[in-house]
Image (cartoon, helix red, strand yellow):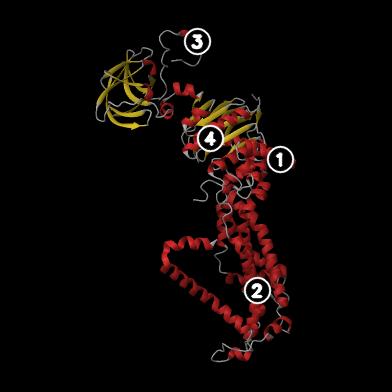
Amino acid sequence: MSGTATSARGPRGGGLRALMLWLAAGLLLAVWAFPVLWGLLTSFKTERDVLAYPPKVLFEPTLDNYREVIFGASSILPNLWSSMIVSTSATVLTMLFAVPAAYALARLRYPAKRTSGFYVLATQMLPPVGLIIPYYLVLQKIGGLDTYSGMTAIYLTFSLPFAIWLMVSYFEDIPQEMEEAALLDRAGRLRTLWYVILPQVRGGIAVTTIFVFLNAWNEFLFAVVLGGNNVRPVTVAMFNFISVEQTQWARLAAGAMLAMAPVILIGLAAQRHIVKGLTVGAVKGGGRR
Amino acid sequence: MTSVGKVRIEGVVKRHGSFTALHGLDLEIEPGEFFALLGPSGSGKTTTLRILAGLEEVDGGRVLIDGVDVTHNQPGERDVAMVFQSYALYPHMTVSENIAFPLKMIGTPAAEIVAAVRDAATRVDIAHLLARRPGQLSGGQQQRCALARAIVRKPRLFLLDEPLSNLDAKLRLETRAELRKLQRSLGVTTVYVTHDQEEAMTVADRMAVFMEGRMVQIGRPKDIFREPANITVAGFIGTPPMNLLAAEMADGQVRLHGASLPVNSAPGVARPVVLGVRPADLRITASGIPARVEFIEDLGDNVIINFDVGGQRVKARSEQHPELSEGQTVHLTFDPRAAHLFDPDSGSRLAPALPAASSPEAAIATPGRTSR
């Protein structure tokens, strides 16, 4: 997709322009990639090599760090599992509620539609740190601290509005007439949603699901305060490699690499879903507008 | 001819907030008829169609299909099919799946669906495109696909909302004729919305002209063309539409720009009128209304001559006139029977032109319709 776009633009822009673009892209990529690469290298170093000054570019790689964070006393496997449970349940529940809710916001006429739409957006404007103490107190009251259900519920409070807000725009892209055609074809409201609308927002559902999952997976602030020994996601577990006496950089890096793996895998797998454009051309002029 | 598909609209009112889209519409459409709703945008024609489809609620009145009150029925319960202006094809389904969709929704057995889809696609000449997706079709093919989806389940009513407006001019002419043929062969009552009077004239058995939320005239296209009920209809129908000129009327003559011409009209007191003459009814003669040639639009086989008559623009459509040149002054006349007179205040047609010299039989033979 992007390949054709580049080659179509190339001849017009000329060689110099293309070169500049490549340079800019390369620079941005380097800024993003350097810490990750550094982390990757660090994860194969001994603690002594990590702290060596000047930094060692050539060193003898070791798998000790991985052995430790996977099988050792400070194994993060339970924490990865914990992250997986919280993220997956938050994502599934979010999507289950967000899709119909977004459809309703996009389509149905009901009183206070504007108000509820604004409310959804307003929840995104609150700085999360301001909510930690109220959430803590609420969870404490209902016995939800350090439980999967409690943590999932808290994640829903910000992922649900976000997912709804994202999905609404996908639903609004579908012409009203498409739905009216389905109603005339006797599909009814629910079958119209199932057969006509949802297939057209597949891309949007995929993108939203990924965002929601990644947000939950990467979440640290709520997890560190509201979790505990029982529910300790990997982000919190990694934090434990940093202590007052010592920071175990190499292990921290190895843990980070493991925590990043699912994120990168999901990103690669979902790449093609993010390409929208299935609906182009179905409604006249749709492709040109 | 089929006996289902009779439509009756009784006193239908539709408001959008403070705007009234339809002010109490009464309309009857006969089974098997090709009926056009014609009018400029915002006149209420599309609203009427959507009310028939059940996509809009009414604020008053009733809608009956085959004698059954369907005013509050859901769109799916009315057994009507619609072709949308945008076609509204389902982009994620193939042509075949698109056409099959209405049948699938009513639980038709798979084997029957395949046959019906093939039949419908063949009728509109897209049987070779069944495996494609709408995005891979041309505009004309998309339009046919939408038509096939509408005819596949043999509804009792077809609703077409400006189905040709997205096609290019040549394709529009072809499709227009094919649409007419298709409707004849299916015999299904068809309600067709268009703002193009020529389209309505050529395809419709009868048509209703809408202006500002009211139906101002209903009848056969021919009759509406011959006898527009008021100034707005007169100014809307015809290519180019009727010339409408402010004039004086007295003793069976109209006075206009210093000239007097006889018209067929009941004698009456002197009064101002609006004189309507179709461009094709104007003749260039030695005496008559003085008119200066402003410019000539050459259409090839004939021309449209734009005149200035005392500051008013007048168009005449005629054969080639090689002797005319721009700026020249000539004289215009018309057959007294070709004059249409309207009331300048109400806009409505004045006592229709009397039948041509002593033919009372003709007048009796077509009651309610005055022959020229």
Residue A191 in the image: x percent, y percent?
Answer: 68, 47
| Chain for numbered disc 1 | B
Dot 3 corresponds to which residue?
A: B364
Mark in the foreground, 2 or 4: 4
> Can residue B292 be seen by looking at this rendering?
yes
Tag 3: amino acid: Ile
- Residue A75 placement, left or right of A25: right
- Residue A184 placement, left or right of B339: right
| Chain for numbered disc 3 | B
Residue A125 in the image: x percent, y percent?
Answer: 54, 65
Q: What residue do we see at 69% from left, 66% from top?
A: A88
Mark in the foreground, 1 or 2: 1
Circle on res. A261: 2
Mark 1 vs mark 3: tell me if same chain.
Answer: yes
| Chain for numbered disc 2 | A
Using the numbered discs, state the Cα–Cα distance from disc 4 to disc 1 in whole angstroms.
26 Å
Residue B336 in the image: x percent, y percent?
Answer: 36, 15
Instruction: Give A35 or B27, whichever is nearer the viewer.
Output: A35
